[in-house]
Amino acid sequence: MPLVLTLLFVFALTPFESSIERAFTAIQNKEWITAAAGLDEAYAEQPTIFAANNFHYLRGRVAEDQGDWQRARDEFRKIAEDNPLHALASWHAARAFARLHDDAASLELLAHLPRNFPPAWKLQIAREAGGSVALQIYNGLPTREARYERARALNDIAGFWTLIRESEDDDIALDSARLLSGSADSASDQMRLAEVFALHRQFEEALALYQHAAADAAYSADARYRIARIHFQQENYRVALEDYRGLAKDFAGTDWEKESDYEIASCYWRLAEYRDSEQAYVDYIRKYGQSGLREAATRNLIDVYRVLGENQKALATLDRALATQLSPATRQVFLFTKAKVLYIEKRYAAALAILQQLGRTRLRSAPGSATAAEVEYFQALCHSKLGNQAAAKAVWRKLARNEFSYYGQRATEKLGRKPISNSAAVCLSEPNSVLKNIEADLASLRHPLRSEAGTAADVVSELIFTRPARRTAAEIAYVAGQYDRSISLADRLPKTDTTMPLLYPVGYAKLICDAATAYKIDPLWLHAIIWQESKYDPTSQSGAGARGLMQFIPETARAVSASIGMPAVTVEKLYEPAISIQLGAAYWSALIQKLKSPEMALAAYNGGPDNVQRWASKSSDPELFVSDIGFVETKKYVMLVFAARAAYGSFGN
């Protein structure tokens, strides 16, 4: 039962108030028998005051937790229609009637709920009741989940297809595709379902459907290309290479050949066959020029030269490209890349000149691009290498003022100071002081007991005796364990010592601390990763098929679970916090042990270990790794997780 429901009284000394106090203490400790006895004694003492303060509602909630559905039904039915809690009480009563198999009464109460009543609550009753009650509830709701459940109950094939056409990136689409896959006879249907499976990284199901569709001449090229793409995503680069070669040969002169030629060069790079990759990119640029992915191919060719240590070839290619017409974003990327190559070549003055040019430019986001802080940081590095320590320190002091940012932390280190870090604070053995402070804040919102019902109040004020401001709402969300909502609300508040814990909540603390201890890792990294991945929402799902607190894609979850002896993890299991945190701790521990660098480990967590190897191979200087991350999302991810970890590390300092 949410703690919010315990904020309904003020301490006093009468027998009635003493019974209420005993009941609330028992509720906090989940001692339902004692809580029920205390409330019953209070009702016997002062039934009018009991009703005026909505303790019938609270007595019904206690009965629910006891599984006493008859008592719950009776208590909720005592809430009058003019009471602000009437809608909530009606829902609870409908749930009790459903549990007691009085379907007609349950449906009647649900039918009279306000139009804006949360559909998810009605769905809860449908799932619990099943049968005709569930079907009638589904019929009255427009949500995707309700429509899916209705289609499943009626075996409505058209309904499943409608759900997939509307959206392919949620679990409803995936579940619908699973139910349809066995009956998909046409190549177009097979392609559509395979696309859903591939989007959710259910590759084996996708491959089977694409292979069937490839037999149809009208879909052959598209299906084969997607098969090659899956092999590439599975890091079966040799197989993908042969797939793309076959496509380029069989569909010569078409866009399929052009697309395949580009991917062939990428496969060679992943296979570390750099000379073949170089030649493939050179051939692609020469063959397709402006009509193909010239800028992307040129960027990759430059990176291949950097991997080979052929910096003069890289510089020559950059200069040729910079002499042509480029998009503004690509021009900035090439200038930044040139500055880094010059830095590697110890041509610091030339690198600094380019970096100063970039510093006067409005920087655009693109693969390989720089941020303003990044440009300033590398300017300071060049100043330092040129012996101008005063200029370097001035830049680093400026960056260090943003103490949580990635380059602020790096600048702090350059100035000889240690970045903020207090790993022990999040795993202290005593009760969570943040939670205790928030509970004290909320307790201060109580007001004296009423002698008459407050029919003009709103629902929230009845539950906590006040209309909460944004900070109060954030605190309520924190106490209720809805950390994602706490973060969302606190993000719009001034950043102070009292709001920072709401913005960076220490959620699932015991699970995280236990996992960190078991795998000998810093718990701050787990909190920071969860904060960035899901904001502590265990139901979170990404468009790339990642799920749960630590956002695992199915194949990574299977590999990690197998490595630690965990039973096979289904997609549904990824939403369970305990499983997600254990997998995340094991995976993070393995990445840190293998890569020896939190930057590389974070990049691998987000972008994959194979890509980290590519990015790291461009330079042996660890200063350059983050700047060489090739995915915009991954580079941003690394910086944001570092910032979140610094925020968590500031607690207790």
Image (cartoon, rainbow, N blue to C red):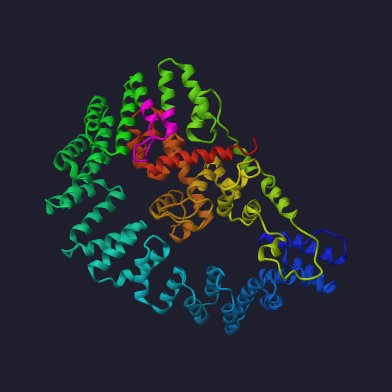
Magenta stretch in the rendered image: 355-376
Horizontal side, residue 604 vs residue 78: left or right: left
Direction top: furthest residue: 387
Horizontal side, residue 450 vs residue 224: left or right: right
Using the rendered view, name the quadrant where residue 12 is placed.
bottom right
The x, y position of residue 348, in whole percent, is 36, 20
The x, y position of residue 95, in whole percent, is 60, 75
Residue 198 within the magenta-colored segment of the rendering = no
Residue 635 higher or lower than 23, as above or below:
above
The x, y position of residue 308, in whole percent, is 26, 29
Identified at 85% across, 72% down, the residue is 45
Give the quadrant of the C terminus.
top right
Horizontal side, residue 286 vs residue 211: left or right: left
Identified at 23% across, 43% down, the residue is 293
Identified at 27% across, 27% down, the residue is 309
Residue 362 within the magenta-colored segment of the rendering = yes
The x, y position of residue 148, in whole percent, is 42, 71
